[in-house]
Image (cartoon, rainbow, N blue to C red):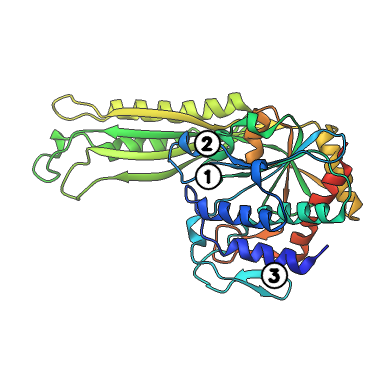
Amino acid sequence: MNERRAIELVMRLMAIRGTSCEEADIAAAIIDILEEHSIGGSCISFDTAHKRTPRRGSVGNLIIKLPGTKRAGRILLSAHMDTVPICVGTEPKRVGQQIISANRSTGLGADDRAGVAAILTGLIEMLESGVAIPPLTLCFFVQEEIGLQGSRHLSVAKLGKIAMAYNFDGGSPFKLTIGATGGERLRIVLNGLAAHAGLAPEAGASAIHAAGLAISQLHRQGWLGAVRKGKRQGTSNIGVIHGGAATNVVCDRVEIDAEARSHDGAFRDEIASAIEAAFVTAARQVQSSGGQAVTADVVRRVDYESFRLPSDAPVVANAVAAVRSLGAEPVMAISNGGVDANWLVRHGIPTVTMGCGQREVHTTSESLDIKDFLAACRLVQELIRHAT
């Protein structure tokens, strides 16, 4: 493999700005790279996912569909294009066997430009080798970092009939993520009654008071943080609270963002229901002297469903063979976070997720391990080679 070219390619991609909903420039760069290697024309398209997501984006998922030169099931290779805001202004720089950002106030953006680069590198190497390849579809998702929105709203029919898929994201290239948790978000709005906090506090109904009661109840009953009820397990978090304008005004509005997760879909729903019930009950308990209670409006949305692939599924077996062909031993993993594979599996596409050597993502200490990144590039080639 041309290792120098692979490293130059990933550094080129990481330097391009492209936060969630602003992926047009990185998509254009990917197309330029493909066209530099005579891949273009009608095989490249976009879907309209960005028009269906909660936040309208600049471009949809980028899809490259290649016919292949041997009879085999079509393979999907995917990664996401967007980075988190902390990566804006990154200056990729190689230091020994790592790539970091020379701008130490930013992240690197290896999550997930390394995934994009590994797929492109592996494809280019295979095409240049002249060996027969199976039908391939490449899909580069938008808006992964804000709730897997690109894969959720994917136009599945544009991919072709997929036999198996491999999603490249963070971590070790030899860790095969074959399952992941499910997640649900809650938007809670508490509406109370404003009053002067010094002259007549009893005339008000404090939304902050209601929020405090609800959170305290959830804590006492074991529904916050690591949630364990018998053999059932999950997590929950109150992540964002906005409310109040001044200390001398009884707060009349609080907005809260919360989440619930579990590998057991029914238990995830139970956690979310406990959160909802706590806020509704607490709101009723806080009333003004005139009898007006705080009200709670709760909107729930499933971000992604949990999944777990059988360890002997063909998509897993192919990944195991690819890893072992590089002299490594695969490690099966179940993730407590969501990945694009959650939605791909939901769309009926069995998907294994692998890493590309990203370290400490979403921080200013983010780095890319070059050895692991190059291993991911080789894994792409082996996944294509072993496909039947």
Question: Residue sitting at 18 percent across and 34 percent down?
Answer: 193
Instruction: Looking at the image, tell me whether mark 1 or mark 3 is earlier in sequence order.
Output: 3
Q: Is residue 225 above or below residue 327?
A: above
Q: Circle 3 is placed at which residue position? A: 98
Left or right of residue 380, residue 101 in this image? left
Q: Amino acid at mark 1?
A: Gln
Residue 49: image tag: 2
The residue closer to the viewer here, 61 or 202, is 61
Residue 105, x across and y down, in percent: 49, 70
- Where's the C terminus, which quadrant? top right
Task: Give percent across and percent down for residue 167.
Answer: 70, 44
Q: Looking at the picture, which amino acid does disc 3 mark?
A: Gln
**Contact, mark 1 vs mark 3 (Cβ under 8 Å):** no
**Alpha carbons under labels 2 and 1: distance apart:** 10 Å
Q: Of the residues tagged 3 and 2, which is closer to the observer?
A: 2
Do the residues bearing badges 2 and 1 touch, measured as CB atoms within 8 Å?
A: yes
**Residue in front for this viewpoint, 377 or 238:** 377
Which residue is under mark 1? 143
The mark that comes first in sequence, 3 or 2, is 2
